[in-house]
């Protein structure tokens, strides 16, 4: 279930799976804000803790000069049990998941947290980064090495299986421009957690939008 990717278990998996040499001072994760998924897909969060984390993030103008190039963020690297990051996400976040030889997913059931839609065909799912790669590039990561970028791009703790429609509507937007139809509080808790762990910056509009929603969580 999705809870596996946002709680302590996912963080432990991510750290264990990280390529050697990638945990430098820029990308070594800090502690996380615990979040659990309740029946119906609503995430239980400690809103006060998330707001405290948000307050500690450095506010800075987006680094639009650090252009995002997909080839510089290697995707779907092996992370666990012979599975690549995409396969691992589909297996860990679905129920009744079946696979062919290796890790190729052939069936299962997933509930997309962005829109609450139930999916039974893995081919119709996208695996989204909580903080999109292009947004990560603009968020104070200019000094990251290729290994740092690879580590983030394949970290199970920041990957979520969602409907392609919801993922395409999100694009590379931050919360000032896009929020999911469902579970906004849980989404923002994961967003703040991700930016905290990877020491990313937030811009002022992003910070203001997150803070406004969190006051209602």
Image: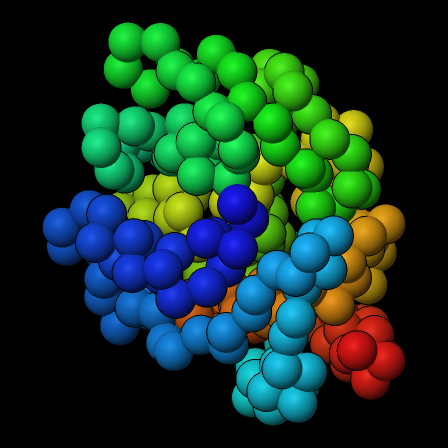
The one of 90 and 174 positioned closer to us in this rendering: 90
- Where residue 211 appears, x then y in whole percent? 78, 81
Q: Is residue 205 left or right of residue 58?
A: right
Q: How many marks?
A: 0
Please tell me which residue is depicted at 33% across the width and 29% down the height of the picture: 84
- Is the image coloured rainbow, by chain, by secondary structure, or in one colour? rainbow
Quarter that holds the C terminus: bottom right
Please tell me which residue is depicted at 30% across the width and 68% down the height of the picture: 28
Asked if one can make out residue 133 in the rendered structure from this viewpoint, the answer is no
The one of 116 and 21 positioned closer to us in this rendering: 116
Asked if one can make out residue 124 in the rendered structure from this viewpoint, the answer is yes
Residue farthest along the left direction in this orientation: 20
The one of 125 and 147 positioned closer to us in this rendering: 125
- Where residue 62 appears, x then y in whole percent? 65, 64
Above or below, 103 against 173 in this view is above
Above or below, 166 against 139 in this view is above
Above or below, 99 against 85 in this view is above
Above or below, 11 against 147 in this view is below
- Where residue 111 appears, x then y in whole percent? 68, 37
- Where residue 141 appears, x then y in whole percent? 45, 61
Q: Is residue 136 left or right of residue 153?
A: right
Q: Is residue 30 left or right of residue 132?
A: left
Asked which quadrant contains residue 61, the reply is bottom right
Please tell me which residue is depicted at 23% across the width and 47% down the height of the picture: 17
Please tell me which residue is depicted at 74% across the width and 68% down the height of the picture: 185
């Amino acid at each position: 279930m999705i809870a596996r990717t946002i709680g302590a278990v996912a963080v432990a998996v991510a750290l264990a799976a990280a390529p050697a040499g990638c945990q430098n001072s820029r990308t070594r994760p800090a502690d996380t804000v615990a979040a659990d998924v309740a029946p119906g897909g609503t995430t239980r969060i400690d809103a006060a803790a998330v707001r405290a984390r948000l307050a500690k993030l450095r506010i800075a103008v987006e680094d639009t000069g650090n252009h995002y190039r997909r080839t510089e963020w290697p995707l779907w690297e092996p992370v666990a049990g012979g599975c690549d990051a995409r396969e691992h996400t589909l297996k860990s976040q679905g129920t009744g998941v079946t696979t062919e030889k290796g890790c190729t997913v052939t069936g299962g059931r997933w509930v997309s947290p962005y829109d609450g839609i139930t999916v039974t065909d893995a081919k119709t799912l996208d695996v989204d980064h909580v903080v999109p790669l292009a947004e990560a590039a603009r968020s104070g990561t200019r000094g990251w090495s290729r290994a740092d970028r690879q580590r983030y791009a394949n970290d199970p703790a920041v990957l979520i299986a969602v409907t392609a429609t919801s993922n395409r509507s999100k694009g590379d937007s931050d919360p000032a421009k896009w929020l999911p139809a469902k579970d906004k509080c849980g989404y923002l808790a994961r967003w703040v957690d991700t930016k905290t762990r990877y020491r990313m910056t937030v811009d002022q509009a992003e910070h203001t939008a997150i803070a406004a929603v969190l006051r209602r969580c």
